Amino acid sequence: MLYPWGNNRRFNSYPDYLRKIFGNRVQKVTLDAGFTCPNRDGTKGKGGCTFCLNDAFSPSYCSPDKPIGQQIREGIEFHGKRYRRATQYLAYFQAYSNTYLPLARLKQLYDEAMAHDAVAGLVIGTRPDCVDNEKLDYFAQLSEKTYLILEYGVESVYDNTLQRINRGHTFADSVNAIKDTARRGIKTGCHMIIGLPGETPEQIIDSASVLSSLPLTTIKFHQLQIFRGTQMEKEYRENPGEFRLFSPDEYLSFMAEYIIRLNPGFVIERIAGETPPRYAAVNRWGPRYDEILLRFEKNLEKMDYWQGKKFNMSKLFI
Ligand code: SF4
């Protein structure tokens, strides 16, 4: 059976999406350009989101002490050994909030990344409160010349959750930023955390319908991971009963129920997170991401589920 995204996989997968655009395997090279974020420097808050541990997401070649060009060269070498078929790369500005500098400086950093021959585009991770009209107009121009996507950390659609994790912005901020971005013809991505404290399974499932009404290109899910040394670890130690940590099997069954309600037009970039076990304070998952993905697809097959099977356009309410 061919699904709405044009192949027989049961969800709209990121590698297939990239292959359609670029014609071959494309790999992301993660960069740390030395940004900070308004939730750490005191503009919005101090201490950051309660779950945040940026080290847990950065590969070894990534360091703000190295110029962007060097990080790209080393990143390509790193991935070249693992993904031999990749000939093109997307420069992934990942660490902290990668639009949180004056536009002139941003342009220098992005230009430096684009200067490498193998770089075919930009993926820029940021917060919804770190873009403005001037920056979005610039991104709109840039995205006419190259592949570009702005990935927003949305994390939850519930303001009381966002407050509890000290996010420093509301869901309405995310909706506005995503709409302002998409309106200019720029691709938009969003990152969600599944299982944040205080959210019931029903609320999390309902968020699939809420998000489905947004003009998103890609979406990325991480199960809640509690990292060593974070404020969230402290809260967990004090009140473990308030946290619902999924085992891999529970999570994959849950996400099957989630994605059948998700807009089939969204490309699912990740279904779960994968971080080095040494950073996990609790609930370390054994299987690697490839294995997780395989199990997820088997689950979908067994249940005869696919992304958007229960997606109902008439229920959209934003
Ligand atoms: S998760 Fe992102 S927004 Fe939150 S503190 Fe960390 S870098 Fe800042």
Image (cartoon, grey):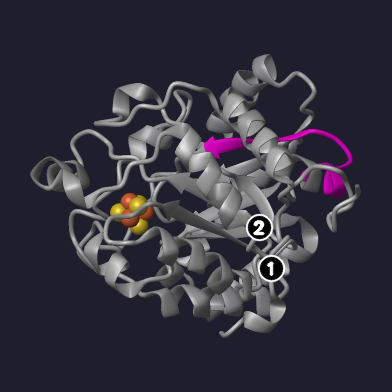
Going by the numbered disc 1, the residue's amino acid type is: Phe
Residue nearest the viewer, comparing 131 with 279 = 279
Residue placed farthest to the front in the image?
303
Mark 1 lies on residue: 311
Q: Is residue 281 above or below residue 6?
A: above
Local packing at callout 2 (Cα closer than 10 Å; few below 14, some 14-19, many 20+) is: many
The boundaries of the magenta stretch are 18-30
Q: Is residue 87 above or below residue 211?
A: above
Mark 2 lies on residue: 260
Q: Is residue 240 above or below residue 43?
A: above
Sooner in the amino-acid sequence: mark 2 or mark 1 = 2
Q: Residue at x 26, y 31 (%)?
A: 282
Local packing at callout 1 (Cα closer than 10 Å; few below 14, some 14-19, many 20+) is: some
Asked if the residues shown at circle 2 and circle 1 are in contact, with their CB atoms under 8 angstroms apart, the answer is yes
Q: Which mark is residue 36?
A: none
Quarter containing the C terminus: bottom right
